[in-house]
Image: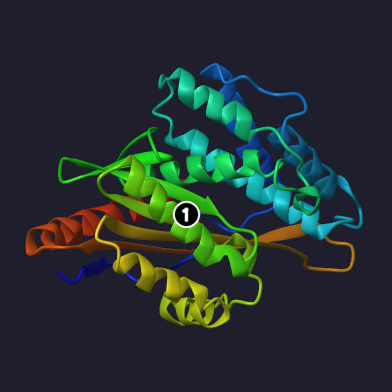
Amino acid sequence: MTAEESTGGWRHGPAIPTAGASSVLRSADYALKRFRTIGVPIPSPCRLEAARAVVSSARNARDGADDFALLAEATRTVYEFYYISRSIGGTGGTADRRLKAALGNALSGPLDIREEEDESARPRNTQFELFVGAWLTCGGATIRQAEPDLQLQIDEKWLGVAAKRVRSRRKILQRVVEASEQGRHRTKAGLVALSIDHFIEPVDTGPDPKVAGQSLETHVPEILEAHELLMSQAHIRGFVVIGSKYEWVSTSAHGRPHLRMSTFSRFQLFANSDEEKLAGDAFLSAFDETQRDRLSRF
């Protein structure tokens, strides 16, 4: 049977309102305090602490930042860990040993992404896995850490989630195939989650989600190819695409820089039966409503 699709379409907009450096610093402090409270082993050096220092330096500098690319990456690091920290229960929430170890690993590695190599990419890869879990949790989904990276519950069934952070367009399909194989060998059915952070720079960041999605697909046609490939795999039940763009701009020659952030996401579910499609449609409808409500209060 040919798979049918349930999808909410492209979503585009700021996950956290446009703000200045002080807001970013408060988010960093919240995440660091939260991680320490639940017993996460904070590495030394800690990438989140390094990111906070870069943002603090830019806020205090008379002429703004010296390296806006590094400042943008520092901001991404802060906000993704803030997002993750907010997903770990309430103020009295806890984390199991596996989650604490994953967080400790994710907090390591070089802050400057231009210094990243295959081995030093592991902390950010883990960060993306945790971010996907947080993103799904924000939509009210039930998540657990298990093979291949995460597992998501839909209609009382657990689906494996293989998360792939890709740094080169030419490797998108390769990584998607790897993720599909992970799902085939480790779980009966699963989803693939793909990070597109590295490919967003030329994308139209206007307010219309449809236009933004079309612009993204034009600049990165491999996303559509990956979609078609995954739909042809009977064991693949969905495709999550997530990306964000951070830009710091100064409003005057000597003004403090302000943050502009754009986010792109699409959550698709594939169904091999009418029953699965009904369950997928209901899940995505509730997911979108819950996530929009929670993000509005971040």
User: Of 87 and 132, which appears nearest the observer?
Assistant: 132
Q: Amino acid at mark 1?
A: Glu
Residue 194, position as x, y percentages in the image: 48, 58
User: Of 125 and 38, which appears nearest the observer?
Assistant: 125
What is the quadrant of residue 166 in the picture?
bottom right
Residue under numbered circle 1: 178
Q: Residue at 11% of width from left, 63% of height from top?
A: 273
What is the quadrant of residue 229 in the picture?
bottom left
Left or right relative to 272: residue 52: right
- Residue 125 visible here: yes
Q: Residue at 52% of width from left, 81% of height from top?
A: 215
Residue 278, position as x, y percentages in the image: 11, 61
Q: Residue at 26% of width from left, 49% of height from top?
A: 189
The N terminus, quarter of image: bottom left
Depicted 236 relative to depicted 60: above or below: below
Left or right relative to 5: residue 257: right
Q: Residue at 84% of width from left, 61% of height from top?
A: 255
Left or right relative to 59: residue 189: left
Depicted 184 relative to depicted 156: above or below: below
- Residue 34 visible here: no
Residue 99, position as x, y percentages in the image: 48, 26
Left or right relative to 73: residue 155: left
